[in-house]
Amino acid sequence: MSTTDKPTRRRLGPVRRGRALTLTAAATTLALGLAACSGGPASTNAVEGGKGKTIEATMAFTLSSGFDPANASSAVATAVNQHIFEALVDLDPITREPYLALAKADPVASGDGLTYTVSLRDGAKFSDGSPVTAEDVAWSFTRVLKPADPAAPPLMQGFIPFIEAVTAKDATTAEFKLKYPFALFAERISVVKIVPKAKTGDAAAAKAFDTAPIGSGPFKMDSASKESGIKLSRNDTYNGPRPATADAMTWNTTTEAAARVSDLQGGRVQAIESVPYLNVDSLKGKYTVDVKQAFNQVFLMFNTQAAPFNDKRVRQALHYAIDKDAVIKTALNGYGSPATSYLDEGNKDYQKAATVYDYNLDKAKALLAEAGVSNLSIQLDTTDSSIVKDVAPLVVEQWKKIGVNASLNTVPSAAIYGDVVPKDTFRVLMATGDPSVFGVDTDLLMRWFYYGETWPGKRYRWSDADRKAMAALLDQAAQTSDEAARKALWKQALDKVADEVPLYPILHTKVVTAYDPGKLTGFSGAATTGLYFLGASRNG
């Protein structure tokens, strides 16, 4: 939502508990003072104003995954899913504040914080007209927690390790059993979108659902492809707080920065993401340009089991050899900041890492010498993100100063993670990553890259000892009620990944979005990848 067209706001109140819970415990352990946006008259008026209108936009990534929200991770899919699915509690994609979505009221906690009950919104339906039930809620969580194939856990599993089981108490009430009290329960359950059990109950059904998803959100997906983009339309069965304010949306997808700018200036679309930094000044005036500091990072990832990158000193050397300020000035026109931690400095929980990779050629050379490495030649695999394509050649040139020669291999994300990285020949990757689309707390952001199997086990091949040590730190922090103690454990985790650098940011970017204010109202850019039109209306 824009700063000039905000709907009324309310608070998502403290989590309610049983009568046995004392007021002191409620205030100190699991209280949730969380701001939220609600629907209301402003939303209703926006719907009326947007009838018959289609919103057109151009995304900065191509479609590289399916849409099943248990596993969807591509920039396009996660943005689409925010419009077609709901969680019990969702995070506003712009403010990052939680609001009640499918939940009728705040989650109610037991006295010991180990049981929660959540009631569903009255009359909630999926876009095919079938009712949303507590059985669908229980199934949506169970398929993530206990998948049919334990060897291939869904991506969302790593975000909810505190949940033991979810069951349906009755048709409209779900009950959560926790392994331990977790203070961020209400906002964290936003990572699991609710899907119809009837459409995802077995492997064949789930496979079909991945390409033809059905949700309870304000929009439904009509078609999707890498070539023709995404087409969405209003979900007429939706009765929640964020009704669609346009009849349809068409999202074009391209990694070509010039094509996105041309789409906006030529009137083909009303909004584009990832504005090329060199075009920011020329677009200002006629268009609104939103600049947001972001977690979004350009990172290096190594095969930590393959020589010479099984020696962390070699990994560290490549980081020290990068003049990040020069890269940001040249490739990003200044729209970024050097990484001083895994977290960006704008994060409320930011802590500077014990190891910071300032530009230091002498140290880089010394580390390579200590590791016994000289005249290193490698292939640097990269995704085809426009930012990566601008950054990578500069980094390759800088590495030459320490005797490292790298050739570039640039391919789409789907091919990188589906074909290049799994091979034994993989060594080094440069890509972008932004798990902040799912949430911005440290626990969630750390779990994305450093917990579970997908990234640590299958991609950068971290040792069992390192993976177990990281999991232990994050799990211990999650179970710690004292905020200072939890932050101290997070600091240990942040310092560990800064020292080991199996996957670690070079820099954090600023996200720049541009739109035509004469043709869009109620819209603003996000501090994450993706475009979000909840509450946006099409004019003209």
Image: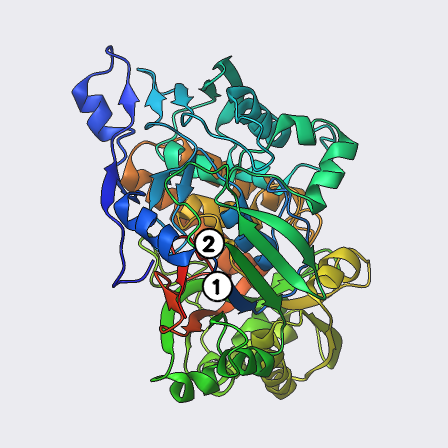
Q: Residues within 10 Å of mark 1 (few under 14, many from 20)?
A: many
Per the image, label 1 sits on a secondary structure element best described as: strand
The quarter in which the C terminus is drawn is bottom left
Q: Is residue 75 above or below residue 183?
A: below
Q: Residue at x 55, y 76 (%)?
A: 268
x and y, in percent, of residue 383 in the image? 67, 69
* Disc 1 to disc 2: CB gap under 8 Å: yes
Q: Which residue is rendered at x = 54% and y = 62% of the image?
A: 504
Q: Is residue 502 visible?
A: no
Q: How many angstroms separate mark 1 from mark 2 (CA)?
A: 8 Å
Residue type, numbered disc 2:
Ser
| Disc number for residue 436 | 2
Residue 289 shows up from this direction = yes
Q: Amino acid at mark 1?
A: Asn
> Which secondary structure, mark 2?
helix
Q: Is residue 309 above or below residue 453?
A: below
**Earlier-in-chain disc, 1 versus 2:** 1
Q: Nearer the viewer, residue 240 or 361?
A: 240
Number of numbered discs present? 2
In the rendered view, tell whether residue 198 sits above or below residue 58: above
| Name of the residue lying farthest toward the right | 424
Residue that sits furthest to the left in the current view: 23
Q: Within 10 Å of the Cα at label 2, are there few (<14), some (14-19), or many (20+) other Cα atoms?
A: many
Q: Which residue is mark 1?
A: 296
Residue 369 in the figure: left or right of residue 97: right
Q: Quadrant of the N terminus?
A: bottom left
**Residue in front for this viewpoint, 387 or 429:** 387
**Which image quadrant for residue 298?**
bottom right
The x, y position of residue 19, in whole percent, is: 23, 11
Q: Residue 16: percent from the left, percent from the top? A: 28, 22
Q: Is residue 242 left or right of residue 531?
A: left
